[in-house]
Every structure is written in structure tokens, then in C-alpha cells.
Amino acid sequence: MTKTVGRVSLYDYDRTDWQAFCQARGLPKYRGTQIHEALMRGANQSSLMQNIPNTLKAEIDAAFPKSALSIRKLQVSSIDGSRKYLFQLRDGAMVEAVLMHYHHGASICLSTQVGCCMGCYFCASSQLGFERNLSAGEMLEQFVLVSKEAGLRIHNMVLMGIGEPLDNLDEVLRFVDLVSDPKGVNLGARRITISTSGLIPGIDRLAALRPQFTLSISLHAAEQAKRAEIMPIANRYPLDELMAACKRYLKAGGKRISFEYILLRDFNDRDEDAEALAQLVKPLLCHVNLIPSNEVPGSRYHASRKSQIRRFQSIVESHGIPCTLRRSLGRDIEAACGQLRRSEKEKHSCGDIC
């Protein structure tokens, strides 16, 4: 049972909510619009809202006494300009976001939970365990603050940061509504990708909604035993049942599925692994996204050799399956999910406070 937090951020409230907030206090409706506009510009606390009177700022502070989300640490890659953010939440918890630059525009990777309970053995996020879900507003606040700090418009978003999005699906769907609001960020659903390690009930729920965003499945192995070895969730939702859920999703009208496959040397990157992957996904409308591993300290899994990555890709493509290799961004800034958060918590536990 995951821990819920309710509405804890100013960003948990949309323009209509803020209009109602002001009207309940005898103030004109347009004041609520002004609050919402200020929030969308990154003014995530009343003192930063220059377009409203001090009396209204006091009303906001009285109703929402908790401090705002803040950027605890920022690292900028000298290699490719990727920006890694460590956010501190109101309760002191920390999550990460990464801003990446591609030829088609800026893309952001956001967190949906504080920690993760999926326990994938190659992932830094799982090593610190699970604390709680993020609210929809906390996700939106990450997005807006990154856009403000970087000084640019973000064109695409992936929910592949810390946490399992489908384990916090109610808040994730509410966040998608907030970030898609034409009066707010106005990020179209077709520019949003939601990832899952394979939570079948969540996939079926999404299928019923017939969403316009892209569903991404973290597959990472094409055989049940091997997948269960690195992803404990596969014991609860076996591979054959997961693939059946993917078929139901597509049959219900879902867009092409993206299968994520992290390449681990001499474990899942052999020629026979590529053949097994191709046979597994070939019946589906899909795309395979190969991911070079960002090695996690203490893990027994290592990054595949470049020559084998290219060979693996060519084998999958020989079966007529679209297969791309994700650019490995931010290697010099601990850009893999959870690495920066883990290093910061280790510093804190040792008394080395930033």
C-alpha cells in the first residue's frame, strides 16, 4: 500500500480552484487567475507573486503554511548541457529531474514518487527504498521550476525518473490533466510518455482511458526467469501476462508501445537475447529503445560494450522492428535515476551537509 499525501502544493490547484479561493474571500475572480498565472511563471510562493496585493499574499500563506519546493542541488553536464536537479520537498524528502537537449527540443524526465518499491537490482532509485507518493502538484512544480531555471520552453516530458508512475496512477493522471491545461503549461498529451515496470492493473486501466500519451514498458529481458532475476515485479506479473496486457492495450486503441531495454554486459546483451527480444515483441505495434547502462556503484551489473550494443541493435532491426539507441546523456553529472539523491543522502548520513 503506497503512502498518499493529498494536495500539498500550491500547484495542486488549477485556475478554477484559485478563482474559487478568491471568491470565497470576497475577492474578484480575476485575482485567482493572477495567482495561477504567477504560479505558471515559477512564482511558487506568495512572496514571489508580484501581481497580487499583500493582503492576498497573507491569505495564501494562512491557507498554505508549508514552504515551497526548492532546488537543493543543480549539476550541468560539460559534455552535452544536460541539467540534473535535486529537489527538496516540503517535508525534507528529495527527488530528481533531468533536463535533456535533443534536436527536436528540450525534454524533461520527472519523478513520480519519493523512492521506489519495485526493487530493480540495476537501479539506484530502489536502493534507498520507498517513502511516499508525490502529489500531482509536486510533479507540476518540478516541471515549472526547471523551465524557469533553464529559461526555456520544454517540448517533451517522460515520467521515468524516481518511482513507478502506475503505482501512483491517480496523481499521475491528475498531473497529466494539469500539465495539459491550455491555460497553464499547455503541454500536449502526445508529447508525454509514461513509463512502467509492468504493473498490469495500471496498464489495463490506461487501456480503458484510450490515452493519447505514449506508454513505455521497462522490459529489460525477454525471458521470464532472467527478467525476474533483475526485476522482482516480474514474479508478481509474469512476462506472458505482461505481453497479454500490452495486446489488450493496443486493441483498445492505445498508441504504439515503447519497450525500454537496458543493456547489461554478458547478462541480457548476447545475440540470443536480441533474438528472443525480437520474437517477443514482433507481434505488437511497438518500438524498442535500447539504453546503455549508467553503472550504479555496488551493482554487479555492468555496461555493455559499444560493439555488442551495435550488434544487438542490428539483430533486432533485422526482424523489421524499429529499434533506436538512446543517447547516453549526463554521464558526468550522475544522470541515472536516483544517483544524485543517493549520494546526497549518503553525505547527509555522514554529517557532510551541503
Image (spheres, rainbow, N blue to C red):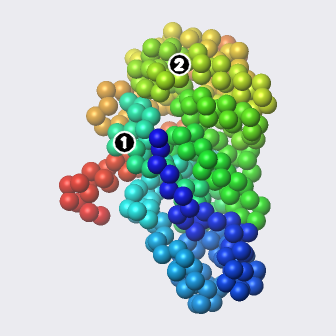
Is residue 265 shown left or right of residue 26?
Answer: left
At x 20%, y 55%, the residue is 350
Q: Secondary structure at mark 1?
A: loop
In the image, is residue 134 above or below residue 46? above
Q: Earlier in the sequence, mark 2 or mark 1?
A: 1
In the image, is residue 206 above or below residue 43? above
Disc 2 residue type (three-letter): Pro
Residue 74 is at least partly visible in this image: no
In the image, is residue 212 above or below residue 299? below
Disc 1 residue type (three-letter): Gly
Neighbor class of circle 1 (other Cα within 10 Å; few <14, some 14-19, many 20+) is: some
Neighbor class of circle 2 (other Cα within 10 Å; few <14, some 14-19, many 20+) is: some
Q: Position of residue 346 (x, y in %)?
A: 27, 51
What separation in Å lies between label 2 and label 1 (alpha carbons)? Answer: 23 Å
- Label tally: 2
Residue 327 is at least partly visible in this image: yes
> Considering the image in quadrants, where does the C terminus appear?
bottom left
Q: Position of residue 224 (x, y in %)?
A: 49, 15
The residue beneath circle 2 is: 238
Q: Foreground residue, 82 or 46? A: 46
In the image, is residue 137 above or below residue 131? below
Is residue 299 shown left or right of residue 149?
Answer: left
Q: Position of residue 38 (x, y in %)?
A: 64, 75
User: Are dots 2 and 1 in contact, CB under 8 Å?
Assistant: no
At x 40%, y 44%, the residue is 130
Which dot marks residue 129? 1
